[in-house]
Amino acid sequence: CLDQRIETIVSDAKILEKRLSNSIPRLAGQSSILNTSTLLISSLESILNTNSDETSQTQVGLHLTETKMHLKTIIEKLNSIDPSAAVQELLYTANVIFCTLSSSGVSAMKRTSQIDDLFVDEAAAATEV
């Protein structure tokens, strides 16, 4: 039961790592979040690969401490990212953007160099195209 929960957490950590590398690759690379997430996954996998004898329980405790440290570091690094830079990078890496008519004209959208697909709700209310 515990192994299944840890496997689920490992899977979730891998999904987070992939989403960060796809959505904010520059910011994630600059803040080394991706390196830390790789260390987190490695720590969790080490717990799964540990035997259940007494010596191994000490190793599990060390891996749990390591895991907690990596999680704390990831949270701190995510909190240190400038929200406006994250929004700009998310817009830049997006394949499709859905927005309202009023948000389509905000400065973050105007600074986005290339938008392939933009779906605008309330577009019929626009006075200009």
Image (cartoon, rainbow, N blue to C red):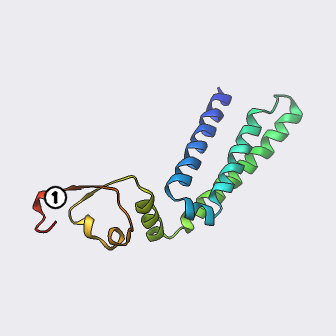
Foreground pick, 25 / 33: 25
Please identify the quarter of the rendering in which residue 59 is found.
top right
Foreground pick, 76 / 83: 83
Question: x and y percent of residue 71 in the render?
Answer: 64, 53
Residue depicted at x 70% and y 55%: 69
Classify the position of the C terminus by image quarter.
bottom left
- Secondary element under disc 1, as helix, strand or loop, is helix
* Residue, far top: 1
Please identify the quarter of the rendering in which residue 81 is found.
bottom right
Q: Is residue 65 left or right of residue 19?
A: right
Would you place residue 57 above or below residue 78 in this image? above
Classify the position of the N terminus by image quarter.
top right
Residue depicted at x 84% and y 40%: 58
Question: x and y percent of residue 120 in the render?
Answer: 22, 56
Q: Is residue 96 left or right of residue 49?
A: left
Would you place residue 129 above or below residue 16 in this image? below
Residue denoted by label 1 = 123
Q: Is residue 62 left or right of residue 9?
A: right
Residue depicted at x 56% and y 63%: 26
Q: Looking at numbered disc 1 in the image, what kind of residue is underneath it?
A: Ala
Residue depicted at x 56% and y 47%: 18
Would you place residue 85 above or below residue 67 in this image? below
Foreground pick, 86 / 52: 86
Question: x and y percent of residue 22 in the render?
Answer: 52, 52
Foreground pick, 46 / 111: 111
Q: Is residue 104 left or right of residue 52?
A: left
Q: Residues within 10 Å of mark 1 (few under 14, many from 20)?
A: some
